[in-house]
Amino acid sequence: MATDNKDESFIETKARDFNKDNVDKSTGVIKKAFIDTIPVMTGYLVLGFGFGIIVKANGYSILLAFAMSFLIYAGSMQYVAINLINGGASFIAIALTTLMVNARHLFYGISMLDKYKNTGKRKPYLIFSLTDETYSLVVRDNKHIPEKDKKTYYLLVSVMNQTYWVMGSLLGAVAGSVITFNSKGIDFALTALFLTVFIEQWLTTKNHGPAIIGVVTSIICLAVFGGDRFLIPTMVIITFLLGVYREASLENEKDIESNYSPCKKEAKEVDSYE
Amino acid sequence: MNNAYIWGAVLIIALVTAGIRFLPFLVFGGKRKAPKIIDKLGKTLPFAVMGMLVVYCLKGVSFGDIKGFVPELIACFVVFIAHVIKRNTLVSIVAGTVCYMILVQSVFVP
């Protein structure tokens, strides 16, 4: 373990120095994508495993567990789905619940419009597989990935993450009752992943308005609406506040632009490559 | 509960989920340039959304009982310290998760 960590920080430091271009490109990006997805692997294997167990425990087939993780690929919604199906909910109720639970994914699309713009044939899959965790990895600046490898990196991260999720579900459905490893609390890996991305974003930007708006709005809505239904009001208020926030700080426009345009910068860099 | 119902339900959930994920790209992803407000939202949302996701993950925390929030608080603090010092995502996540697992498995046992 210790050597692994050393190795990883070595890679990151090297990448940060941008001196790594002589190393074999394709294995470089695969290795980086794999290392970056290790936290997701931990979380997805465990949560997927749990999902597989639930599917089997409710008397459904392994095929169903596989099909859901392959076709739906939305963690919390899949857990909810089993409850809905058990209760014989109507198709309309199922569609509406899905809309509510997964509405946050609208935000991911909006903030990935630029980065996923010229991704060609990869695009449909990149969009389909944009889960919370995949989003948290691809939305970062990813300075350790050379500009021209970014599209490949996005695809690798997306495919690897879904592979972990499907594998976890299958393992859970097949071997759920056999394995006894005490994994209690391991799902904190996903909380920790989001938290590190949040901290990293905080440390690399000067203007913390949007981050504060996100946290404070969520906490207030959580207190007011409760854990099961706070996401939708949170999203509405965040959208509103970010709109107003931008208007209000118009005079700092240039300043903000320079802080918030990682995408623009990238676009320029891409241009210079092509 | 027949098979047609189960697979119908799965199909609907899959379609609605994919629909939500594709919608922004279908509406704003074409040749037509996205309105300025969407462009700006796209740049500010990542920061707000990551904050929202952290809160979303911690929504189960309850302050009525020490066991309900102290493990999360300590583990998040470990992630924070580890990340500020090392700036290495994997190290921060492993440190926080191992810490959390030890806390909920052997210190704050229900």
Image (tube, coloured by chain):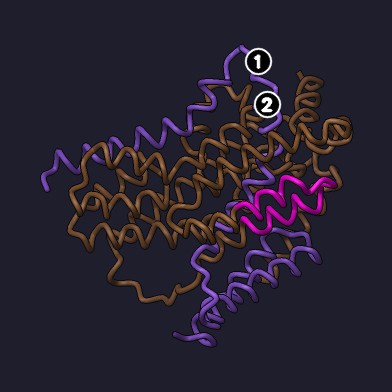
Distance from Cα at disc 1 to Cα at disc 2: 11 Å
Name the magenta segment's main secondary structure.
helix
How many labels sit on residues? 2
Residue at (77, 28) in percent of width and height: A264
The one nearer the camera, A205 or A125, is A205
What is the three-letter code of the residue carrying label 2?
Ile
Picture quadrant where residue A60 is located: bottom left
Q: Is residue A195 highlighted in magenta?
A: yes
Residues at marks 1 and 2 on the same chain: yes
Chain to which mark 2 belongs = B
Q: Position of residue A42 (x, y in %)?
A: 51, 61
Range shown magenta: A194-217
- Disc 2, SS: helix
Residue that badge 1 annotates:
B33
Residue that badge 2 annotates:
B37
Q: Position of residue B56 (x, y in %)?
A: 54, 56
Compared across the picture, whether A158 is left or right of A69 comes to right
Q: Is residue A144 highlighted in magenta?
A: no
Residue at (56, 40) in percent of width and height: A236
Q: Residues within 10 Å of mark 1 (few under 14, many from 20)?
A: few
Residue at (34, 37) in percent of width and height: B14
